[in-house]
Amino acid sequence: MAIIEVVRGDGSQVPRHLTVRLGWLAAIWIVSTAVFLVAAFMLYLLDLPVPK
């Protein structure tokens, strides 16, 4: 995976362009949001009772 190669080391191989860094941020944000929404939808489908 490319992100592992970016993080590993002393930082000398970090992408220099701001657009690449923002692209990684957006990709991680989108994937984590999608995972959260899928998990919430799956819990919704289970129709678990909500404690009050």
Image: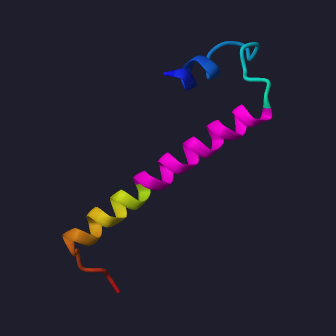
Q: Is residue 2 left or right of residue 24?
A: left
Q: Is residue 17 left or right of residue 47?
A: right
The chosen color scheme is rainbow
Most frequent secondary structure within the magenta stretch: helix
How many numbered marks appear? Answer: 0
Where on the picture, by quarter, is residue 18? top right
Residue 24 painted magenta: yes
Q: Is residue 17 left or right of residue 28?
A: right
The image shows residue 36 at horizontal and vertical percentages of 43, 57
Q: Residue at the left extreme? A: 46
Q: Nearer the viewer, residue 24 or 8?
A: 24
The residue that appears at 63% across and 22% down in the rendered structure is 7
Where on the picture, by quarter, is residue 3? top right
Q: Is residue 37 above or below residue 24?
A: below
Quarter of the figure that contains the C terminus: bottom left
The image shows residue 30 at horizontal and vertical percentages of 53, 50
Region rendered in magenta? 18-35
Residue 26 painted magenta: yes
The image shows residue 46 at horizontal and vertical percentages of 20, 69
Q: Is residue 40 left or right of residue 14?
A: left
The residue that appears at 56% across and 42% down in the rendered structure is 28
The residue that appears at 79% across and 28% down in the rendered structure is 17
Q: Is residue 8 above or below residue 48?
A: above
Where on the picture, by quarter, is residue 12? top right
The image shows residue 2 at horizontal and vertical percentages of 54, 22
Q: Residue at the bottom extreme? A: 52
Q: Is residue 29 above or below residue 40?
A: above
